[in-house]
Amino acid sequence: MMLVAAPFLVCAGVGLFFRKPWQRVVFPGIGVAGIYAVVLYSMQADMVRRGPVAGVVPAEPIRVATEVALVALPVGMSAGLVFHLITRFIRTKKA
């Protein structure tokens, strides 16, 4: 489970180094999408192609990696937003 969550946490944590709020949200999403796309493409690129079953389109590694990246992008952006809001709340908290 940590292998799945680690890119989200790392990219959201690195996103906190940016100054502008939109950068803290967008860049972690792009980072997570890139990490998942590269890893998934590298895992599928070496697979041996077999004949497709009748009526089924064979999955291309680049297409599958793109689909996963498009799912990971908003999740990474959400993680970046949550980290930004938490740090903003901690920073503005008055004792």
Image (cartoon, rainbow, N blue to C red):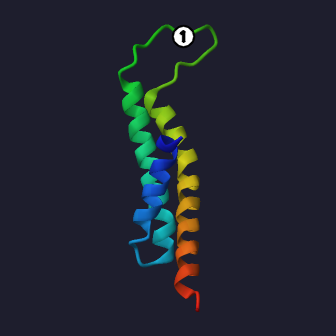
- Determine which residue is flagged by label 1: 52
Q: Residue at left 50%, top 7%?
A: 51
* Residue 54 position within the rendered picture, expressed as x and y whole percent measured from the top left: 62, 8
Residue 19 is drawn in which quadrant? bottom left
Query: Observer-nearest residue: 57 or 82?
Result: 82
Residue 94 in which image quadrant: bottom right
Q: Quadrant of the N terminus?
A: top right
Nearer to me, 14 or 23? 14
- Left or right, residue 30 beside residue 95: left
Dividing the picture into quadrants, the one containing residue 55 is top right
Residue at the spot 44% in from the left edge and 70% down from the top edge: 16
Q: Position of residue 23 (x, y in %)?
A: 45, 70
Q: Residue visible at 53% across and 72% down?
A: 84
Question: Residue placed at 37% from the left, 25% from the top?
Answer: 45
Badge 1 amino acid: Pro
Where's residue 37, x and y in %?
A: 44, 41
Name the residue nearer the viewer: 37 or 17.
17
Quarter that holds the C terminus: bottom right
